[in-house]
Image (tube, rainbow, N blue to C red):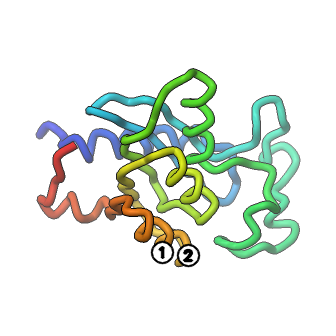
Amino acid sequence: MSRPTWEEYFMEIARLVARRSTCLRRQVGAVVVKEKNILATGYNGTPSGIAHCSEVGCLRQKLNVPSGERHELCRGLHAEQNAIIQAAKHGVNISGGTLYCTNSPCVICSKMLINAGISRIVYLEGYPDQLSLEMLAESGIGVHSFADFTDGKALEL
């Protein structure tokens, strides 16, 4: 068994974090890293103390809302949002950090990541949100598909 690269290591942790998701439609995990240290994690699901969608049903399914649209019509928070909130709750500065996420961020999360000072995003799977990618590109945040790293193109952290 070979030792994982840093990108593989942190993405595997993001995959594990995603398993905590309470979303019925998509399980997403996020890990914020700086200088090879994990600063915060997040997964998508309802706020603390609120009934999970597995208990009350998915509002988006009930309303037939397509993926990538009308983000406000959901009981849950996105994994990236929960990672930012976790860092803020514990007084952790994530500015300059890298976000490893099982999905590329939506436009709402992208705006939050830009203002939080995230400098780099590595995602496992795409997400249907062109405006998100345009805003991230304009902000100068490096956005990388994890597939780029599996071809031996590892970047220095």
In the picture provided, is 147 more to the left or to the right than 139?
Answer: left
Label 2 Cα neighbours within 10 Å, binned few <14 / some 14-19 / many ≥20: few
Q: Residue at x 54, y 50 (%)?
A: 115
Instruction: Give the quadrant of the N terminus.
Output: top left
**Residue 74 image-quadrant placement:** bottom right
For disc 1, the marked residue is: 134
Please, is residue 83 above or below residue 91 in the view? Answer: below
Q: Residue at x 79, y 60 (%)?
A: 72
Q: Position of residue 151 (x, y in %)?
A: 15, 64
Label 1 Cα neighbours within 10 Å, binned few <14 / some 14-19 / many ≥20: few
In the picture provided, is 14 more to the left or to the right than 154?
Answer: right
Q: Position of residue 27 (x, y in %)?
A: 58, 52
Callout 1 amino acid: Glu
Q: Residue at x 50, y 54 (%)?
A: 114
Please, is residue 32 above or below residue 130 in the view? Answer: above
In the structure shown, which secondary structural element does the residue marked by tag 2 occupy? helix
Q: Position of residue 117 (x, y in %)?
A: 46, 46
Callout 2 amino acid: Leu
Q: Are marks 2 and 1 in contact (CB under 8 Å)?
A: yes
Q: Which mark is residue 63?
A: none
Q: CA distance from mark 2 to mark 1?
A: 5 Å
Q: Nearer the viewer, residue 115 or 106?
A: 115
